[in-house]
Amino acid sequence: MASRARQNDASDGFGPKRLVAMGYDKIAEEYLARYGSSSVRDRWLSQLVMLVAPRVRARILDLGCGAGIPLTRHLTLLGHYVLGVDASARQIALARRNAPLADFIHADMTTIDVPAASFDAVAAFYSITHMPRREHAGLFKQIAEWLRPGGVLVGSLGAAALPDWQGEWMGTEMFFSHYDADTYIVLLREAGFAIERMEQLDQDNEVTRFLWTVARRPTAPARAGRLRRTERSELRGIYSNSR
Ligand SMILES: C[S@@+](CC[C@H](N)C(=O)[O-])C[C@H]1O[C@@H](n2cnc3c(N)ncnc32)[C@H](O)[C@@H]1O
């Protein structure tokens, strides 16, 4: 697939995204050793596998693919086509080694140039929460465009509001930023997604929780506009607190 980055803000620009990319350049191996295994992630990876199962060779975009373990590698070994994107050069180097059947782009995920409607699924596991939250709405719109009608987004979002946070994490300077579940429901709907599943789950390998989400690009255009109050309260029932 012909894909490229319009520009690599993550490594050439300044600000939080560059900080995140540089941070993962430093901690890539340590991150994998510490967080490479997670029953929570495995469960959502299984969800993704199930959702793309009707296709023998699904096309999957892995945003913030990290070192390619487990997602990129597992999905390619199942016979799917995976395009991994990561802002960290070190993570991409590890991913190329760990998942040699996949293609990769070293770039900020918001700058990639991929054809519209070209993916059956987009995975974003633990990556969007590293991006300034003011960019999340725009990213959801891009993801909706990259997905074919009927395609799905599976990933982890923030479970509670966290305005741009910068500080020490795993011995390096890091950045996290996200909204709460109610806001994500609105933003995903505004991007045209139908939310199929949302669940707030504690991580098994760190004291934190994420809002795991399955959102589908409908085959018919979704109704535009903000959610009415009644719709919003119906949607609230979609996600549950696992604690
Ligand atoms: C916590 S790691 C998750 C890696 C992998 N998805 C996993 O499940 O373990 C987050 C990854 O997202 C990448 N990332 C963060 N912001 C990004 C951005 N704006 N564009 C591309 N990759 C980004 C980081 O470089 C890092 O490799």
Image (cartoon, rainbow, N blue to C red):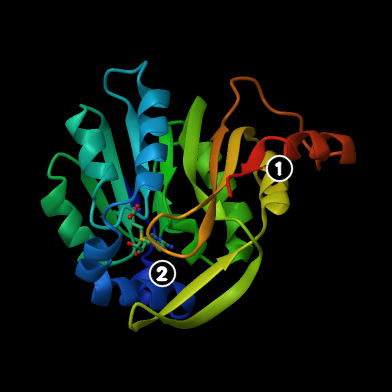
The image quadrant that residue 64 belongs to is bottom left
Where is 220 relative to 36, above or below? above
Is label 2 in a helix, a strand or a loop? helix
Q: Quadrant of the N terminus?
A: top left
Task: Identify the disc placed on residue 36.
Answer: none
The amino acid at mark 1 is Glu
Instruction: Give the residue at mark 2.
Output: 9
User: What amino acid is at disc 2?
Assistant: Asp
As displayed, is residue 205 above or below residue 26? Answer: above
Residue farthest front in this picture: 243
Q: Residue 3 vs residue 150: left or right?
A: left
Residue at the disc numbered 1: 190
Specify whether residue 228 is in view.
yes
Q: Residue at x 49, y 38 (%)?
A: 153
Task: Give the camera-side residue of 83 and 72.
Answer: 72
Q: Secondary structure at mark 1?
A: helix
Using a 10 Å C-alpha cutoff, classify the residue at mark 1 as few (fewer than 14 neighbours), some (14 to 19) or many (20 or more).
some
From the viewer's perspective, tell me whether residue 145 is left or right of residue 187: left
Q: Is residue 1 visible?
A: no
Identify which residue is drawn at 60% across, 56% down: 159
Q: Going 63% across and 64% down the picture, which residue do you hit?
A: 134
Q: Position of residue 57 (x, y in %)?
A: 27, 23
Q: CA distance from mark 2 to mark 1?
A: 26 Å
* Picture coordinates of residue 17, whole percent (x, y): 44, 72
